[in-house]
Amino acid sequence: MIVADVGLVHLDDIAVSVSSRRVRLTVSDDDSDVVWTVTPPTCRHRFGDDRSACYNNGVLTVTVGME
């Protein structure tokens, strides 16, 4: 599970992309993009297809299963 305090940005300014090797969170504002990248703990692990995301009051929670 990944939890990010992204402030009170509009939902349209948040992008989440997930592949088997990384989760990328992008928060855009008028001036720039802030990007966080999370990778599996070891090269033997991969992110699975069990994925969900929830945004509530400035907190983005992304849940990704492992294989």
Image (cartoon, grey):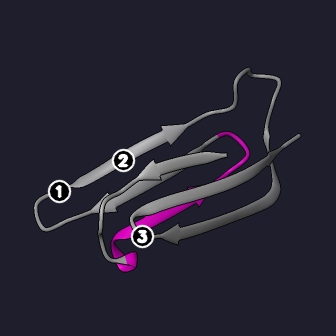
Q: Residue most toward the right?
A: 67
Q: Residue at x 52, y 61 (%)?
A: 16
Can you tell which mark lies on residue 57? 3
- Residue 29 against residue 34 in the figure, above or below: below
Tell which residue pokes out farthest to the left in this image: 31
C-beta proximity under 8 Å, tags 2 and 3:
no
Residue 40 % position (x, y): 69, 31
Q: Residue at x 17, y 56 (%)?
A: 32
Q: What is the three-letter code of the residue carrying label 1?
A: Ser
Q: Position of residue 54 (x, y in %)?
A: 59, 68
What count of labels does the image hold?
Answer: 3
Which residue carries the number 2 mark?
35
Instruction: Tell me the crowding category of disc 2: few under 14, some 14 to 19, or many 20 or more residues within 10 angstroms, Cα based.
Output: few
Measure the C-alpha gap from mark 2 to mark 3. Answer: 20 Å
The image position of residue 13, as x and y in percent, is 33, 72
Instruction: State which quarter of the image contains the C terminus.
Output: top right
Give left or right: position of 23 versus 58.
right
Q: Are marks 3 and 1 in contact (CB under 8 Å)?
A: no
SS of the residue at dot 2? strand
Spatial distance from mark 1 to mark 2, Cα to Cα? 10 Å
Q: How many neighbours does mark 1 have within 10 angstroms: few (below 14), some (14-19), or many (20 or more)?
A: few
Look at label 3 and name its amino acid.
Answer: Asn
Q: Position of residue 6 (x, y in %)?
A: 36, 56
Looking at the picture, does residue 61 appear above or below residue 10? above
Which residue has dot 1 on it?
32
